[in-house]
Amino acid sequence: MAIELGILGAGNMAEAIARGVLRGGLLRADQILASDVSPQRRELFNSTLGIRAIDENRTVARQSPVLLLSVKPQYMGEVLAGIRDVARADALIVSIAAGVSTRFIESQLGGQTPRRVIRAMPNTPMLVGEGMVALARGQHAAAQDVQLARGLFEAAATVIELTEDKLDAVTAVSGSGPAYFFYLVEQLIAAAVELGLAPDEARQLAVKTAVGAAKMLATSADSPQELRRKVTSPAGTTHAAITHLEKHDTAATLVAAVKAAAHRSRELGN
């Protein structure tokens, strides 16, 4: 069976994308070939997903009409140099590496045929079918290339197309965003335990509250500010908490944190 999708780097995001592709029926496992340096990741792809995973990038690049680059940004130059002479000239290249520009990938792969590159920023909720992905096309990618790239993600995510200059902000907001929410839930659990709840009770309360609040955000016509106002009775318990957060400039700290993530994304691209 001919390979339709190659994956360089079989980490967690690659796993989420592969699971979505399989779950959506876009491809079968025997139409995907992956590579990774980690024996554990190769074993997961082989045994759990049924996707053949090897330890050699060049074989994957040579066979793949669509090539997903999911290696860490700091290794991208080395990986591209290693496949430059074997990557198919007609391959669509889809990269999920934070900060690495389409022009960098185009220039590193080289060749007489202009390289068609799509840069994508997904997030880990793809693992549960609730991902968010932004796509940006390189200078040689066409509309049909964007549609093909969409297909890799849409079974497990909402997909939007933006210009590439916005992807560092996307990385900071939705790419890194799940970690911010996990951090908040961590602190809710810690506070609940300090207030006398058992750890399992604290976790159940905090997690279910987060899930319910997220569902309200997704389904309500109200803005986040209005939803917050409806919970915050004057001089009540929520008001006491929000007042404490505002007193300590929590909003400014959160905005600065997201900007720090965007700055780091730009650094990785350099």
Image: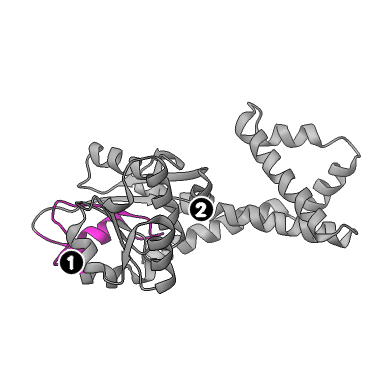
120 vs 99: above or below: above
Residue 86: in magenta span: yes
Rendered location of residue 190, percent (x, y)? 79, 61
Residue bearing mark 1: 84
Q: From this viewpoint, which residue is outermost toward the left?
A: 112
Give residue 124's mark: 2
Taking the image as drawn, is residue 239 in sight? yes
Q: Which residue does the image show at 91% across and 39% down from the upper left?
A: 235
Residue 30 x/y as whole percent: 29, 53
Q: Residue 224 carries which label?
A: none
Residue at position x 39%, y 52% in the image:
18
> Which image quarter: residue 111?
bottom left
Residue 3 is a magenta residue? no
Expressed as whole percent of the image width and height from the top left, the position of residue 245 reads 78, 52
Magenta segment boundaries in residue numbering: 83-111
Q: 157 or 143, which is in the foreground?
A: 157
**Which tag, 2 or 1, sits closer to the chain's start?**
1
